[in-house]
């Protein structure tokens, strides 16, 4: 019996792949000296490996170094790899000196390693460049074991795509690392096989077959060369013919196999079992390829023939067994039944030994790392067991023990896969191979180095699950373990429908296990029926197909589909209820109910009742849970217009608002109804208080809400009542069941919103509530000694953890209020630290504002207000400067904000300033410094100043006596992201009673231009006055003595004061302002004026170009003296016929002159178009339009110019307009000026 057992164990082992047969791990399971063997447990094996891995590493021996060199061989036969290798060989050919055996022995170990590296490099080059004779010679010169290792590494590399890593200069153009298929012509297969340093093994033939797979089919010439053959392949010998036949079978080239397969009659006569196995393999493959009906009976008979001869090699009998079992379903019933009857007649038959060996192998190879190998053993086990069960003549009850052990093997693999398998679906998923071909199949799990034994894919295991007939024959406890393991796997792959029948059986005997699995089943159901989850489990998220409508993935969820989901949920609840477990799973079903809805749809009360029944039947805790989720959605999800757009609901704003209000009404109604049945339920009271507050907040956000204040007070009273109701439940049996929800929600509500994520800066806090919360917490000790401290500890811990959920602009408010309530409690240490950091920031940054000049201003004249940021050098360094607050980041291409969202800082401050000032001031202008402005040293030691803005204001009456505080929001990084801190300037007292006020200025420049061109027609002169200064340009009556002598002022056109730019280079930061007037003058009497004197200046001007006097000469401007003569032109009194006569004389004279001279070269007028004096986007566009009319431009230039104009319009006048870049504008203008 011992000999027989050894035989069948070896037979089963023989069914392994060749690589598995050579593995030490796989051989440990079967002891040739007896079927029983000592086997390490999984924990022992892991501990053994860990002990080995943590041992001190020793230097590599020469043999280990050589093995490592072999492992690092890389073959790159891509296009670039072949070219680069050929160039490298040509540039620096390898030189390996030939040495005798005696000379080789004299080399030091280091020299031997260096030489070996060169030899391996030469072999690598030979493979890439197809130098096959040289490769064969090089391998033959090496030690046999090293040559075999190198050859195996070469095959592995050729069967995988080459990894391409572009050089740095190529990567700079956008190229990325990728893989490319190896270029391997089928003709190279013959010399590659010939170079093998040993006989071709089955594993080697498998890899060689891959090289001529479906994507690289040979041409007819290949098969002609194959017949000629070499030492490894071809018709030369029985061995080469056998190798060739197996190669062609493995590669699927079955039509070319016939010349190489042996004669069946001869093989049977000589009992050549290897030849018979090859024939069986061929006919089985031909049958699978549907090459004719004749192949199936031949394959079957040959497999039976080998099995029936005990002298046949064990390895061949194992292969024949598996092949016979796989062919069994294909046979007619009589043939299969007869074989089964004979093989599995009773436990003394040959079949028992077969099944025993299969079971032993499956059991003892559990720690084999190769999941595919273990799967093969389970497949063999399942095929054998099913074959036994299908044999109706066998007494299957006698086989119960063996079938039970089979099931235990399956259970073990199921448990391992449940823990470690990463697959989540039974269905095939869309994938692409390395060449881009699309296919559907099981997604291969990612390799995980920490897993010593790879799990079998869950779907593969479930396909091998035992039948009901099998389960009826196994022991009950093993059967129950199977039901548990299989249901876990079904839930793992999201197949809750297939898991539920198993759970029904588990519930009757293992109710606690069933409860846990049902909770998981409900969660899986919720995931599968969640219409909001963008979960393409069966298609790669990186896949895109041209012509496919991507919008089809966001088809709007219909109400009917949602109702269908909820109907299925109701049915599932009924099914679970029928199990008679002492748990209604209402909490889990509530989560599923939530998931089954579209995020854009408000729940309906009637739907909830259909699913759960009346409000009386629903547990109050479940109602509170549903209301909490609904309240969150009502406050933060359903009002969002973007959500409605994404869900394609096409609701108008009014419809959306009505839906949200209906949601609040439904939630409040449900809460009241549940409170009627459970009046002391504090959780429901908390929800009632929170819903009341959030509904009022929403009504205030969409319109006027006169009841907002009273609603907030009512909400706070409900929170207090809920806290009292909770206190009344104390003490609890378990301190772990104590809750601080009522206190946290009360605190959040006091801040402005009971939902922290929905809290906004415009929500006003109710600071008086913090004291009430504190006193309520303190009175807990009167009910349960020690409860106050326990609850306060939990409360402060929650507040500390929730800081990360607070909006950046509300963190300061949140922390201040929390500290007022909990003080310096140890659990709020982080919050106190952050708050102190905020306090430090506020003291190191100031918003400085002061009036330009005297604070006594006039209500009828504008005055200036300087705005600067003052800060310490340290905070400026930590914040990387404050120049970003001068930028609107959404309008810039480089608006990265270092972990914060892009912000329009400049617009944000301007909006805040206008809101603060508009009540009492007319805002003439707000001008900001350039974003490149540099900070300057402040008069306070250790502080610096960043110039920020200049505001021109005009009081709205003499009663205005204060410039209100202005606010700027500065953001800083903190431990939970970033915080927005409001920095406020102090209020500035002013007096607006003065009728007039002198504003400071310097460097006054005045230009006066006399326009007398309308003197004859309108009897008036126009005097254009253009002035500029640092500071505020003085009013006209304070600057000039008007009117000039002999004239009177008819009208004054005031073009308003303009702040052109802010000059940060001066000490006083005085802005550069301009002011223009056009004064219309008339003489004091009817007489026509003969001269004009420019008005006298009343104020000093700049030393250079302080005063400029000009007059119009046609359209040109010419400089003049202070007093000029106004005389009629000489042509004023001439008659028209003088002009005609003069023109005729000039024409005749010119004609005669031209006729008497040779033609001169044409020198037309210059094409240069003068640049605008003031370059802005508007003036540049006008300038380019002029250039576009120039005849000097060819068609190509006109097209480029049109493109330039379009880009300018998009850049400066589009939705993302850029800031004006004067240098860029000037460069564009000069480029096109040169073009004409």
Image (cartoon, rainbow, N blue to C red):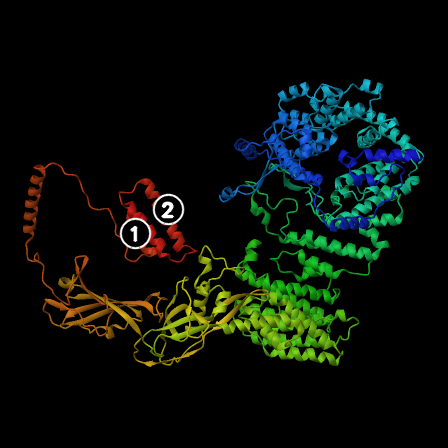
Quarter of the image where one finds residue 696: bottom right
- How dense is the environment of label 1, judged by Cα within 10 Å: few (below 14), some, or many (20 and up)? some
Q: Position of residue 907 (x, y in %)?
A: 44, 64
Confirm whether residue 296 shows in the render.
no
How far apart in space, not on screen, are marks 1 and 2 (Cα)? 15 Å
Residue 98, horizontal then vertical, whole percent: 63, 29
* Element under disc 2: helix
In which image quadrant can residue 201 be found? top right
Which of the numbered marks, if any, corresponds to residue 1203? Answer: 2
**Which numbered marker is on residue 1183?**
1
| 1 and 2 marks in contact (CB < 8 Å) | no
Circle on res. 723: none
Looking at the rendered structure, the secondary structure element under dot 1 is helix
Tell me if 723 is positioned left or right of 408 in this view: left
Q: Is residue 273 above or below residue 1225?
A: above
Relative placement, left or right, of 1052 versus 870 is: left
Judging depth in this view, the residue of 53 and 476 nearest the camera is 53
Image coordinates of residue 169 in percent, x first then y, are: 49, 43
* Residue 1010 in the figure: left or right of residue 395: left
């Amino acid at each position: 019996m011992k000999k027989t057992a050894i035989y069948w164990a070896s037979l089963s082992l023989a069914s392994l792949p060749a690589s598995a047969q050579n593995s030490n791990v796989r051989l440990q399971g079967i002891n040739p000296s007896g079927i029983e063997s000592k086997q390490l447990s999984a924990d022992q094996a892991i501990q053994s490996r860990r002990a080995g891995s943590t041992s001190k590493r020793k230097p590599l021996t020469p043999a280990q170094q050589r093995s490592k060199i072999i492992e690092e061989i890389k073959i790159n036969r891509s296009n670039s790899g072949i070219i680069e290798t050929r160039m490298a060989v040509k540039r620096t050919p390898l030189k390996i000196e030939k040495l005798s055996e005696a000379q080789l022995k004299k080399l030091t170990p280091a020299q031997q390693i260096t030489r070996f590296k060169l030899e391996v490099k030469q072999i690598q080059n030979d493979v890439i460049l197809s130098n096959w004779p040289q490769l064969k010679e090089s391998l033959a010169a090496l030690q046999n074991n090293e040559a075999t290792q190198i050859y195996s590494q070469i095959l592995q590399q050729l069967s995988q795509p080459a990894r391409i890593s572009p050089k740095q200069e190529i990567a700079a153009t956008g190229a990325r690392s990728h893989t490319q298929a190896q270029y391997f012509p089928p003709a190279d297969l013959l010399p590659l096989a010939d170079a093998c340093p040993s006989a071709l093994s089955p594993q080697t033939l498998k890899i060689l077959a891959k090289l001529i797979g479906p994507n690289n089919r040979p041409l007819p010439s290949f098969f002609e060369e194959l017949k000629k053959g070499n030492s490894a392949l071809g018709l030369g010998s029985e061995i080469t013919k056998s190798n060739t036949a197996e190669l062609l079978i493995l590669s699927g080239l079955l039509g070319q196999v016939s010349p190489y397969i042996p004669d069946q009659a001869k093989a049977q006569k000589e009992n050549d079992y290897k030849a018979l196995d090859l024939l069986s393999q061929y006919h089985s493959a031909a049958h699978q390829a549907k090459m004719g009906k004749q192949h199936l009976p031949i394959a079957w008979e040959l497999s039976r023939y080998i099995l029936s001869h005990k002298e046949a090699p064990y390895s061949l009998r194992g292969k024949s067994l598996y092949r016979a079992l796989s062919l069994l379903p294909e046979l007619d019933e009589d043939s299969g039944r007869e074989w089964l009857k004979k093989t599995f007649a009773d436990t003394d038959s040959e079949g028992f030994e077969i099944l025993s060996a299969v079971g032993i192998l499956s059991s003892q190879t559990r720690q084999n790392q190769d999941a595919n190998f273990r799967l093969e053993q389970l497949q063999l086990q399942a095929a054998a067991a099913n074959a036994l069960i299908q044999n109706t003549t066998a007494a299957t009850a006698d086989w119960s023990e063996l079938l039970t052990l089979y099931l235990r093997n399956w259970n073990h693999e199921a448990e391992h896969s449940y823990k470690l398998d990463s697959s989540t679906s039974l269905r095939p998923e869309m994938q692409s191979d390395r060449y881009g071909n699309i296919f559907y199949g099981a997604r291969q799990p990612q390799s995980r180095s920490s897993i010593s034994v790879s799990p079998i894919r869950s779907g593969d295991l479930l396909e091998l699950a035992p039948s009901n007939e099998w389960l009826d024959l196994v022991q009950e406890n093993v059967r129950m373990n199977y039901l548990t393991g299989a249901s876990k796997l079904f839930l793992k792959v999201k197949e809750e429908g297939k898991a539920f029948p198993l759970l029904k059986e588990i519930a009757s005997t293992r109710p606690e296990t069933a409860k846990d699995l049902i909770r998981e089943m409900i969660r899986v159901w919720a995931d599968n029926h969640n219409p909001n989850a963008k979960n393409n489990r069966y298609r790669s998220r990186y896949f895109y197909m041209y012509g496919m409508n991507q919008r089809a993935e966001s088809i709007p969820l219909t109400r009917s589909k949602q109702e269908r989901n909820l109907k299925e949920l109701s049915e599932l609840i009924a099914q679970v209820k029928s199990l008679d477990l002492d748990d209604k799973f209402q909490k889990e079903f509530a989560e599923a109910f939530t998931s089954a809805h579209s995020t854009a749809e408000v729940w309906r009360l009637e739907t909830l009742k259909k699913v759960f029944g009346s409000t009386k039947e629903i547990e109050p805790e479940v109602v509170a849970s549903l209301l909490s989720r609904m309240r969150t959605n009502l406050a933060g999800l359903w009002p969002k217009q973007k959500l409605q757009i994404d869900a394609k609901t096409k609701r108008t704003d009014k419809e959306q608002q009505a839906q949200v209000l209906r949601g609040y009404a439904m939630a409040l109604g449900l809460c009241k109804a549940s409170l009627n049945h459970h009046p002391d339920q504090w959780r429901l009271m908390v929800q009632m208080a929170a819903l009341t507050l959030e509904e009022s907040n929403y009504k205030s956000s969409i319109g006027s809400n006169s009841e907002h204040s009273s609603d907030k007070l009512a909400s706070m009273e409900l929170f207090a009542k809920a806290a009292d109701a909770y206190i009344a439940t104390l003490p609890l049996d378990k301190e772990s069941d104590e809750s601080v929800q009522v206190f946290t929600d009360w605190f959040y509500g006091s801040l402005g919103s009971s939902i922290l994520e929905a809290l906004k800066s415009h929500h006003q806090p109710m600071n008086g509530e913090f004291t009430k919360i504190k006193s309520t917490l303190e009175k807990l000790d009167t009910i349960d000694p020690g409860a106050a401290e326990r609850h306060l500890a939990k409360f402060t811990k929650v507040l500390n953890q929730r800081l990360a959920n607070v909006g950046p602009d509300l963190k300061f408010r949140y922390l201040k209020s929390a500290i007022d309530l909990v003080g310096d409690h140890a659990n709020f240490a982080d919050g106190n630290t952050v708050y102190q950091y905020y306090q430090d920031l506020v003291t190191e940054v100031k918003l400085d504002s002061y009036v330009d000049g005297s604070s006594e201003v006039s209500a009828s004249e504008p005055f200036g207000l300087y705005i600067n940021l003052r800060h310490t050098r340290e905070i400026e360094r930590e914040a990387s400067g404050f120049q970003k607050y001068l930028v609107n980041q959404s309008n810039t291409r480089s608006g990265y904000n270092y972990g914060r969202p892009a912000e329009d800082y400049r617009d944000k401050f301007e909006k805040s300033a206008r809101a603060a000032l508009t009540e009492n001031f007319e805002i003439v202008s707000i001008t900001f410094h350039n974003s490149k402005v540099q900070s300057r040293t402040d008069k306070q030691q250790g502080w610096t100043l960043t110039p920020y803005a200049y505001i021109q204001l005009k009081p709205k009456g003499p009663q205005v006596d204060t410039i209100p505080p202005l606010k700027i929001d500065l953001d800083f990084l903190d431990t939970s992201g970033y915080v927005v801190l409001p920095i406020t300037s102090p209020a500035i007292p002013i007096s607006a009673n003065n009728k007039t006020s002198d504003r400071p200025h310097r460097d006054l420049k005045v230009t006066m231009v006399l326009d007398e061109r309308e003197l004859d027609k309108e009897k008036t002169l126009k005097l254009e006055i253009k002035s500029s200064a640092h500071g505020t340009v003085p009013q006209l009556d304070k600057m000039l003595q008007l009117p000039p002598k002999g004239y009177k002022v008819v009208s004054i056109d005031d073009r308003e004061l303009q702040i052109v730019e802010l000059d940060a280079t001066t000490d006083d930061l005085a802005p550069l302002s301009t002011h223009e007037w056009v004064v219309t003058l008339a003489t004091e009497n009817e007489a026509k004026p003969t001269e004009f004197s420019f008005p006298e200046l009343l104020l000093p001007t700049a030393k250079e170009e302080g005063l400029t006097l000009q007059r119009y000469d046609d359209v040109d401007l010419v400089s003049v003296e202070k007093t000029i003569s106004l005389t009629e032109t000489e042509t004023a009194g001439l008659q028209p016929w003088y002009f005609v006569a003069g023109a005729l004389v000039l024409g005749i004279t010119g004609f005669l002159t031209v006729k008497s001279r040779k033609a001169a070269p044409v020198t037309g007028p210059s094409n240069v178009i003068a640049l605008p004096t003031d370059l802005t986007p508007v003036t540049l566009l006008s300038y380019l339009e002029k250039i576009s009319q120039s005849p000097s431009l060819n068609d190509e230039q006109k097209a480029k110019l049109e493109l330039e104009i379009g880009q300018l319009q998009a850049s400066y006048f589009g939705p993302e307009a850029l800031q004006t870049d004067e240098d860029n504008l000037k460069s564009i203008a000069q480029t096109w000026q040169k073009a004409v």
